[in-house]
Amino acid sequence: MAVKQGDTVKIHYTGTLDDGNIFDSSEGKDPLEFEAGTGKVIKGFDAAIIGMEKGQEKEVKIEAKDAYGEYNPELIQKIPKDKLPKDQEPKPGMPLLIKAPNGQEYPVKIKEVSEKDITIDLNPQLAGKNLNFKIKVVDIL
């Protein structure tokens, strides 16, 4: 039985960047469970598991456009320093959670700090990067 759109699957995976560094893995954890082909995971990962069978392993390379998208310089923004909590001194490279108008929180990274403003990068951490995955289908429910 091969994985098809709408199937709930359990998979183990290890994700690496082109330089070989691991950015995420299910090793030592429960397998990742999701509904295949429904956009619950990144586009390229979703496509890679369609047609795989229980117990099958494979390696795939997902281009940035099919992962977290290309890096977008327009997502670099300045915000007034006084909008930050007063109990933290912002520093370049520091992660920060910002709240969108809909109430959802997003992780961003501080790029620069000036006297009055901070410059934040709203791009996903893995934007602009190709992702390599070793995938194993553990179960098809």
Image: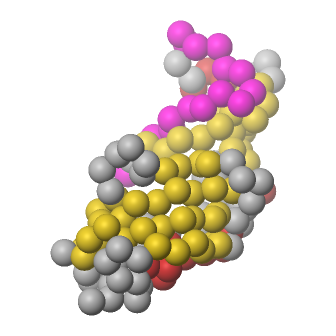
Looking at the image, residue 31 sits to the left or right of residue 61; the answer is left
Q: Which residues are magenta?
A: 86-102
The answer to whether residue 94 is magenta is yes
Whole-percent x and y of residue 49? 43, 79
- Residue 28, image quadrant: top left
**Chief secondary structure of the magenta portion:** loop
Q: Is residue 47 above or below residue 23?
A: below
In the rendered image of this protein, does residue 80 appear above or below residue 49?
above
52 or 131: nearer the viewer: 52
Residue at x 53%, y 49% (from the top left corner)? 24
Query: Relative to the observer, which residue lies in front, 107 or 141?
Result: 141
The image quarter in which residue 129 lies: bottom right
Snapshot quadrant of residue 81 = top right
Q: Position of residue 35 (x, y in %)?
A: 29, 73
Q: Residue at x 60, y 32 (%)?
A: 95
Which residue is outermost to the top? 87
Q: Is residue 78 above or below residue 36?
A: above
Confirm whether residue 73 shows in the render. yes
In the depicted view, which residue is nearer to us: 69 or 33?
33
From this view, report whether residue 47 is shown above or below residue 13: below
The one of 70 and 10 positioned closer to us in this rendering? 10
Q: Indicate whether residue 23 is drawn in magenta.
A: no
Q: Please state the horizontal and vertical placement of residue 101, each as a whole percent of the image.
A: 43, 48
